[in-house]
Image: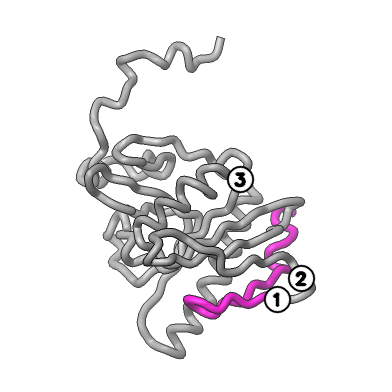
Amino acid sequence: MSAIFDWATSDNLQPEPVTLEIWRKLPEDYCRQVEVVNGDIVRAEPPNRAHQKAARRLADLVEAAALGHVNQYGGCLDVDTDFDVVLWEFPRATIRRPDVALFDCAPNDLRPLPASLVKIAIEVVSPGTEMVDIADKKTEYALAGIPWYWLVWVADNSVSMIKIFVLDHVLGQYIPHLELQPSGGESVIDAPVRCQIDWKRLSDLVL
């Protein structure tokens, strides 16, 4: 019999909603394995190697684009992978971990990062997270006011498609902006920073 039946007892129910104050006091190694949805702890599925590699290489491309943008227009932008972003605190906290995010520079000890600083949230779609990425997180990121959302699919050891969504502030939801599929060279994403997608860098993910 599965161990889940031994675990599923009333003693193991979450005793109370997780607030932002509680979250900041939890061990970081624990927080890296979970997310919070309306105060409830949700286990985050560990990504496979292709997923991790796709996220890292996308982060490199977005970081290069951010550097070019800052050099031309000024300001301060940063890029990171798999870190805590608080979408809202009330009435119950929701804290997600985008695979990649572009955001306004913030102090290193600001944890979790407020969604108001995030310019782009990127999720690499995995078989176990597809419905969460294309439905739940897409709705939540829009409600949190994150201007751009990228959904990235991986197939046959390569990034097979990138869908770009932009927030319609009137509707309060994302609308399709651009859909990219591998080409012989590079594709260009025009906003919020000019990002060149090198498809060769997004292939042969796991050697």
List x then y, in percent, for residue 46. Answer: 53, 41
Q: Amino acid at mark 3?
A: Ser
Residue, x 58% and y 71% (percent of image)?
61
Instruction: Decide whether residue 107 is among the magenta residues.
Output: no
List x then y, in percent, for residue 94. Answer: 33, 46
Judged by its main secondary structure, the magenta piece is loop
Q: Are marks 1 and 2 in contact (CB under 8 Å)?
A: yes
Instruction: Please report whichever mark, 3 or 2, sits nearer to the chain's N-terminal start.
Output: 3
Instruction: Decide whether residue 206 is among the magenta residues.
Output: yes
Q: Residues within 10 Å of mark 1 (few under 14, many from 20)?
A: few
- Residue 126 is labelled as 3
Which residue was labeled with disc 1?
Answer: 186
Image quarter in which the N terminus is found: top right
For the residue labelled by badge 2, is the local secondary structure a helix, a strand or a loop?
loop
Q: Residues within 10 Å of mark 2 (few under 14, many from 20)?
A: few
List x then y, in percent, for residue 35. Answer: 39, 42
Classify 34 as above or below 11. below
Residue, x 23% and y 30% (percent of image)?
16
Residue, x 53% and y 54% (percent of image)?
123
